[in-house]
Image (cartoon, helix red, strand yellow):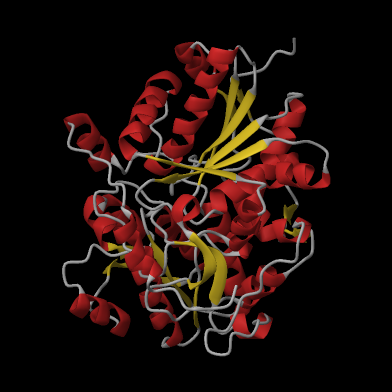
């Protein structure tokens, strides 16, 4: 039997030189992005009015591999390749015959995978001659990552952070400010969109949809500025493919192949990035692994959402994306402790899910923190609440193997650390954490905001 180390770090020369574009290997034509007024498909020039020029090109590209510029690869070398870890101690605690692996993306100051796309977008902004960027952030990992990238490329940054997260995680705000970003709890009184939302619902806890509306408004009224985002869109999924390409190289080196691939899913970039190479195998008929996207029961876009065209923001200013969605007006319940609070899912992943190539599970946060605590005790890393959704289902799959005696190989993404999430861990330890499962009436408030676009 091949000796498998606890951690495997690929050599630096094996860092991917190109991103893998999932859009190029879809079994069907990708769903077009539509203008909300004319309902006509948008082209690169249309998207470039909101996003970076290069991001707009990548968003619609059908090229299978897109070269990673040398300066981005140089930045990646500060914290990549990230380790692939065999979870021996978790396996022992579970008494399972399954082999459990995880790809750990928390080894940078942002504490998550988000830096992979942040540095790419900041680089392209600098190349375009821009001087500032705007964005939103939920739990704070993306805002932190983008503040780091903007500091490196000497770009100004304004971050609109979901209000409830800003209240729960004040030190995330401080880290962003340390890197030079301005941070606003959203909805704020600094934008027309924020003031409108506050006038309608003054006690709102905010949502990513609210924060996106504010960030886009500022980008459209600031010279030499563009809006960038950290998940959902296809070009972000593209940048995160570095995770899956590294994982594949490491697994190949160990002569291992996963039977089950699991990732937490909010907007989809982490999960999509992890599974991209193996999905290519499945779509080409080379293998048939299972792919499981894990989301919170309080924001169940895949498991209870509608596959429909929808806006990306609460203010309804973005183009229309066809995705699994709860409606752009959906507000996650304030007791939800982690990220993964976006109302929709990446269009590529939505299409693959609709075609039956991806499974989805929604899990409650109490059981998520049960899994997070066990993982911390056995593997020595305090996981982010978002990542712990994947841990929950990985444990469940391993326990199924214990019952059946099957020695399956399970791979999941540990997308970040939980070092800034102690308020959530405290609520769990104190027994004050509860699960909120929206009923049909609660979900309908979001569905009522969907546009009647022909499907």
**In which quadrant of the rendered view does residue 45 lie?**
bottom right
Query: Can you give x and y, in whole percent of width and height, for residue 71 in the image?
Result: 66, 59
Give the residue drawn at x 27%, y 51%: 171
Question: Is 212 placed above or below 104 here?
Answer: below
Is residue 152 at least partly visible in the picture?
no
Q: Is residue 44 left or right of residue 212?
A: right
Q: Position of residue 166 (x, y in %)?
A: 26, 58
In the picture, measured across the screen, residue 48 lies left or right of residue 363, that is right
In the rendered view of the protein, which quadrant contains the C terminus? bottom right
Residue at (39, 60) in percent of width and height: 179
Q: Nearer the viewer, residue 275 or 14?
A: 275
Compared with 213, 1 (above or below) is above
Q: Is residue 436 left or right of residue 141?
A: left
Q: Residue at x 71, y 61 (%)?
A: 23
Q: Return the x and y of residue 5 as percentages of the image width and height.
A: 64, 18
341 above or below 396?
below
In terms of image quadrants, where is residue 410?
top right
Residue 332 coordinates in the image, percent (x, y): 32, 57
């Amino acid at each position: 039997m091949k000796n498998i180390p606890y951690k495997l770090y690929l050599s630096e020369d094996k860092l991917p030189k190109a991103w893998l574009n999932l859009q190029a290997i879809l079994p069907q034509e990708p769903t077009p992005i539509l203008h909300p007024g004319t309902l006509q498909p948008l082209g690169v020039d249309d998207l470039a009015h909101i996003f970076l020029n290069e991001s707009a090109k990548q968003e619609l590209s059908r090229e299978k591999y897109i070269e990673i510029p040398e300066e981005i690869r140089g930045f990646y070398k500060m914290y990549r390749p990230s380790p692939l870890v065999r979870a021996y101690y978790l396996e022992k605690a579970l008494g399972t015959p399954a082999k459990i692996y995880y790809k750990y993306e928390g080894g940078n100051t942002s504490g998550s995978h988000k830096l992979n796309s942040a540095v790419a977008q900041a680089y392209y902004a600098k190349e375009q001659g821009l001087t500032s960027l705007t964005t939103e952030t939920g739990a704070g990992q993306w805002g932190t990552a983008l503040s780091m990238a903007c500091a490196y490329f000497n770009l100004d940054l304004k971050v609109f952070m979901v209000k409830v997260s800003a209240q729960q995680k004040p030190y995330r705000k401080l880290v962003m400010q340390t890197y030079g970003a301005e941070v606003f709890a959203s909805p704020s009184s600094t934008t027309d969109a924020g003031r409108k939302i506050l006038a309608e619902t003054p006690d709102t806890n905010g949502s990513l949809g609210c924060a996106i509306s504010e960030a886009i408004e500022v980008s459209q009224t600031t010279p030499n500025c563009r809006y960038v985002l950290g998940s959902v869109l296809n070009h972000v999924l593209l940048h995160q493919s570095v995770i899956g390409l590294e994982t594949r190289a490491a697994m190949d080196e160990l002569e291992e192949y996963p039977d089950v691939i699991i990732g937490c899913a909010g907007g989809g970039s982490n999960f999509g990035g992890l599974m991209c190479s193996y999905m290519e195998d499945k779509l080409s008929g080379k293998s048939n692994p299972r792919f499981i996207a894990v989301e919170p029961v309080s924001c169940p876009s895949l498991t209870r959402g509608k596959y429909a065209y929808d806006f990306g923001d609460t203010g309804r200013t973005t183009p229309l994306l066809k995705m699994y969605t709860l409606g752009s007006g959906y507000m996650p319940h304030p007791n939800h402790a982690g990220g993964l609070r976006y109302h929709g899912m990446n269009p590529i992943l939505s299409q693959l899910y609709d075609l039956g190539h991806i499974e989805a599970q929604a899990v409650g946060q109490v059981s998520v923190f049960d899994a997070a605590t066990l993982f911390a005790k056995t593997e020595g890393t305090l996981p982010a609440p978002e990542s712990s959704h994947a841990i929950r289902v990985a444990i469940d799959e391993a326990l199924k193997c214990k019952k059946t005696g099957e020695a399956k190989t399970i791979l999941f993404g540990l997308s970040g650390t939980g070092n800034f999430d102690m308020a959530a861990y405290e609520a769990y330890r104190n027994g004050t954490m509860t699960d909120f499962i929206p009923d049909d009436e609660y979900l309908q408030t979001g569905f009522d905001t969907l546009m009647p676009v022909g499907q």
